[in-house]
Image: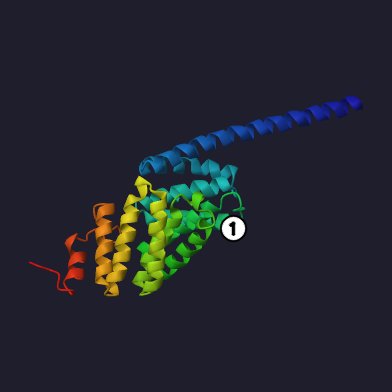
């Protein structure tokens, strides 16, 4: 009897060890693919990121149907599609990741949830749904501002977007507050990759001042935007350099032809 008990214990132990090794093996496979996908995305190689992460998705769905691994896989794949303006592909992935996040504890990585909301907010903004965009950016910012270091600049980006949206809604005081805070945060971060966003924040603040007929303040911000980087505002990429400054100087009698 004791021999049978001992044998059972050995078999159970061997089975557990085998299962643990299998789990580690598939985790290693997933981590390798996910890391490669993230590296490609960070490098701006979106087609490569999409190929890697899309290929990993079926196994991720099978192995972790309700896990954080699936949320991460969906999120980064969606972010890559969004970066290429493939919104029809990005949006359902973000929405699925958001739904799964309600069943996955966000305590370990709340930034993931913030970035999902931010991704959906960008799509809503570009599709002209300002109300939805404002709501999602606000929810994302609430997450990011609790841990700015972990946000890696996404807190500043959400403030920039909120400032832009509030300005479009005629809520100029709120726009100024958000854009001023965004500028301060971008300057603290001082990352070359965020230089374009810093220039855009100055541009949006200038545009807010212009709408309030505060032409002197607007001119300073436009000039600062030029110093930060060659003037190419991402909200209006076709705008010429001369037009905003002309709008400022013409009413104040400062234009000389």
Which x, y percent locates residue 121? 43, 61
233 in relation to 128, above or below: above
User: Would residue 129 be seen by someone viewing this image from the given angle?
Assistant: no
Which x, y percent locates residue 104? 61, 53
- Which residue extends farthest top? 3
| Colour mapping | rainbow
Residue in front for this viewpoint, 250 or 143: 250
Quadrant location, the C terminus:
bottom left
Choose top left, top right, bottom left or bottom right for residue 203. Answer: bottom left
Count of marks, rendered view:
1
Judged left or right of residue 11, residue 70 is left
Q: Which residue is mark 1?
A: 102
| SS at mark 1 in the image | loop
Judged left or right of residue 180, residue 1 is right
257 in relation to 40, above or below: below
Judged left or right of residue 242, residue 30 is right
Which residue does the image show at 56% across and 45% down from the upper left?
A: 69
Residue in front for this viewpoint, 87 or 220: 220
User: Would residue 221 be seen by someone viewing this image from the given angle?
Assistant: yes
Residue in front for this viewpoint, 207 or 133: 207
Which x, y percent locates residue 256? 9, 67
Which x, y percent locates residue 150? 51, 49
Judged left or right of residue 64, residue 248 is left
Choose top left, top right, bottom left or bottom right for residue 1. Answer: top right
Which residue does the image show at 46% across and 40% down from the upper left?
A: 55
Residue in front for this viewpoint, 147 or 4: 147
Q: Residues within 10 Å of mark 1 (few under 14, many from 20)?
A: few
- Which residue extends farthest left? 257
- Which residue extends farthest right? 1
Which residue does the image show at 61% across and 55% down from the upper left?
A: 103
């Amino acid at each position: 009897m004791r021999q049978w008990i001992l044998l059972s214990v050995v078999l159970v132990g061997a089975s557990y060890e085998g299962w643990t090794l299998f789990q580690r093996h598939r985790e290693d496979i997933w981590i390798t693919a996910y890391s490669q996908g993230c590296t490609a995305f960070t490098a701006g190689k979106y087609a490569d990121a999409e190929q890697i992460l899309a290929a990993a998705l079926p196994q991720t769905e099978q192995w972790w149907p309700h896990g954080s691994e699936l949320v991460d896989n969906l999120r980064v794949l969606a972010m890559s599609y969004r970066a290429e303006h493939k919104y029809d592909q990005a949006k359902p992935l973000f929405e699925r990741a958001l739904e799964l996040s309600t069943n996955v504890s966000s305590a370990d990585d709340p930034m993931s949830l913030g970035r999902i909301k931010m991704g959906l907010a960008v799509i809503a903004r570009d599709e002209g749904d300002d109300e939805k965009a404002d709501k999602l950016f606000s929810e994302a910012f609430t997450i990011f501002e609790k841990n700015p270091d972990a946000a890696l600049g996404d807190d500043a980006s959400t403030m920039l977007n909120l400032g832009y949206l509030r300005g479009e809604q005629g809520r100029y005081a709120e726009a100024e507050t958000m854009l001023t805070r965004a500028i301060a945060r971008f300057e603290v971060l001082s990352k070359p990759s965020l230089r374009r966003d810093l220039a855009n924040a100055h541009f949006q603040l200038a545009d807010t001042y212009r709408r309030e007929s505060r032409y002197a303040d607007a001119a300073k911000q436009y000039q600062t935007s030029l110093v930060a980087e060659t003037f190419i505002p991402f909200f209006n990429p076709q705008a010429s350099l001369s037009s905003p400054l002309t709008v400022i100087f013409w009413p104040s009698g400062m234009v000389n032809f």
